[in-house]
Image (tube, rainbow, N blue to C red):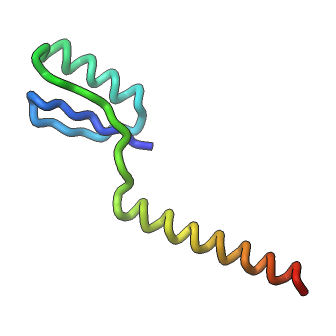
């Protein structure tokens, strides 16, 4: 899961690969700009990630359906 860092005073939003990296960036921003409101939240999936996940779900369903059909014969 990717993490989104939002810093309101700086009009900044950056995506990090891990929560710990996001929190390290948050500490640096707060140390540099004490007035900034900064938080790390889980980032949503990109459209491409969402489409791949949907395809894989359909593929898994197809395999399970085939296995169930073969068990019934």
Residue shown at the point (80%, 77%) measured from the top left? 68
Q: Position of residue 15 (x, y in %)?
A: 30, 41
Residue 48 image point, x, y percent: 38, 64
Q: x and y percent of residue 56 in the render?
A: 56, 67
48 or 38, which is in the foreground?
38
Question: Relative to 15, is 31 above or below?
Answer: above
Query: Which quadrant of the view contains residue 65?
Result: bottom right
Q: In this rendering, is residue 9 above or below 43?
A: above
Q: Quadrant of residue 25?
A: top left
Q: Quadrant of residue 18?
A: top left
Q: Is residue 46 above or below residue 65?
A: above
* Left or right, residue 73 beside residue 64: right
The location of residue 47, given as percent across then percent down, is 35, 63
If the image is split into quadrants, where does the C terminus sit? Answer: bottom right
Q: Is residue 58 above or below residue 15?
A: below
Count of numbered tags: 0
Please name the residue shown 9% across and 30% down the image.
10
């Amino acid at each position: 899961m990717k993490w989104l860092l939002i810093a309101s005073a700086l009009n900044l939003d950056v995506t990090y690969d891990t929560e710990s990296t996001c929190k390290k960036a948050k500490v640096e921003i707060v140390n540099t700009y004490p007035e900034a409101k900064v938080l790390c939240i889980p980032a949503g999936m990109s459209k491409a990630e969402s489409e791949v996940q949907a395809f894989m779900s359909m593929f898994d369903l197809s395999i399970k359906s085939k296995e169930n059909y073969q068990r019934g014969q």
